[in-house]
Image: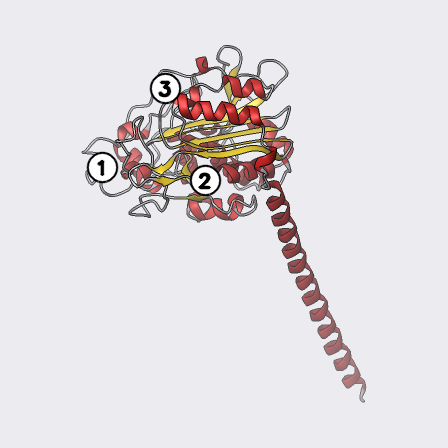
Amino acid sequence: MTVIGKRLFKRVYFFALLVAIIGASCVSSAEKRVRAERKQHEKDSIALVYDTANADKRIDVFMQRLHSRSGFNGNVLVAKHGKIIYQNTFGWADYLMRDSLKISSQFELASVSKPLTATGVLMLIEAGKIKLEQTVDEFFPDFPYPGVTIKLLLTHRSGLTNYLYFTDKKEIWPDKRKGMSNAEVMELLAKHKPDKYANPDVRFFYNNTNYMVLAAIIEKVTGQDFAVYMQEHIFAPAGMKNTAVYSTAVYEKIPTGVIGHDRIWRRSVVQNFQDGPVGDKGIYSTVQDLFLFDRALDEGRLLKPETLDSAYAGYSKPTKELFNYGYGWRTFDPGNHKVVYHTGWWHGFRNIYVRDLEQDITIVLLANLANGSLLHLDELYQILEMPVIRQAAYSASGEFMAE
C-alpha cells in the first residue's frame, strides 16, 4: 500500500470510527431517555395506587355528608407525603343522560388552569426566552396598554379590564356560535381599546384577561399552539395522560363527557364562544392528573426550586394579613404554615386545588354542579390538621378578594 493509500485508509478508518462513536452516543442517549421515561411512568403508576380498604374513614364520612347535605357533585382526591389517602366520585357526569362520574373523568378546570399556565410561562423565563419585566407590546406591537409586564399579568396587577365582559357585546363579537381564539381577542383589544380598570401596578385586580394574554404570549414566543406547548412541556413530562387544552375556537363541541350544571340539575350549561380563549381557563383534567402535576412540581421536574419559591411569594398587600397572590397561585399564610391553592368557577364547573407546602398535603375537588358546596370545607382541613382557608376570603360571587 502506498503512503497516500495508507493516509487515505487512516482517514476513512478514523471517520468510520467517529461515526460509530457518535451513533453509539446517540443510541445511548435515546436509550437513557426511554429508560428514564419508563422509570418515571412506573413511579407515576405507583403514586396513583389507591386501596379503598385503606381510605381515611374520617374523610369519607365528611365527603359523604358534603355530597348528601351540601350537594357536592364531582370528584375528590386527598394525598399526603406523595400517597393518596382518599379518592372518590360523587354523582353524575351528565344529569340528563344519567352518566356516572369516573375517577378519570375530565373536568373544565376553570381558573385552576392558571397555576398550569403560570408554570408554562415560568419555564420560558427559566429558558431565557422571555423576561418578567418585558411588556406585552414587545410581543404584540398593537397592544394599546403600555407598561403592562409579564410580571404584572402573572400577579393580576396589570389594571386591564376583563375581556369576558368586553367581548360579550354583540357589536364586538356578532357570531356567538363561533369560538374566539386568544389571537382574535388580542386583535379586538387592539381595535376597540376598552377602558382599563386601573393603571399598571396600582393594585391587585383579579381578572381573566391577564392569563389569556399570557397564553397568547406563549404562542407568540414558541410558535406553537398553547395546547401543543402545554402538552409537550407540562402534561407529558408530568405524566398527565388525561389532561388537555380544549377550545371552542378549535372544537365545535368540547370532547368531554362531563357537563357543567348551574346550581340546579335542570340547567346544564352550554359551551359558547367564550370557551374559546384559553390560559385563564380551558384546561381539562382529572383529580389524579393534578396530583401528578403536584408531584412533578415537588420533585423539580418542571421548575427550579428558586423559581417555585418566587411563584409562591405574595406580590400585593395581603387580605386579612393572610391571603395574597403569587405567580399563578393564591397564597394563604397564617404565620409559619404556607399553603398555596387556586379556585375556579366557570360555566357550571367549580373547583379548588390546595397544596399544604409544610405537610405535603394535596387536596383536589373538581365539581360540575356550581353550588356552594366547596364553601364548607373547614372540617376537611381540620381532619388533615392543616390551616383552615376561611370562606371570608371570597366575595359573594365566589371570587378571591385582595387589597
Amino acid at dot 3: Ala
Residue 277 lies, in percent from the top left, at 35, 38
Give the CA separation, mark 3 to mark 1: 24 Å
What residue would you read off at disc 3? 198
Res 8 → quadrant: bottom right
Q: Extreme bottom residue here? A: 1
Q: Quadrant of residue 294?
A: top right
What's the residue type where badge 1 is placed? Trp
Q: Tell which circle, 3 or 1, labels the residue nearer the N-terminal end.
A: 1
Please state which of residues 136 and 89 is positioned toward the viewer in this rendering: 89
Would you call the spot at circle 3 few (<14 residues within 10 Å), some (14-19), or many (20 or more)? some
Label whose residue precedes the other's in the sequence (2 or 3): 3
Q: Residue 14 at x, y = what percent?
A: 75, 73
- Name the residue carrying label 1: 173
Proximity of marks 3 and 1: CB atoms separated by less than 8 Å: no
Q: Residue 18 location, x and y as percent?
A: 72, 69
Whether residue 166 is visible here, answered yes or no, is yes
Q: Is residue 369 above or below residue 176?
A: above
SS at badge 3 = loop
Residue bearing mark 2: 285
Counting residues from the start of the chain, the first of labels 1 and 2 encountered is 1
The answer to whether 132 is drawn above or below residue 182 in the figure is above
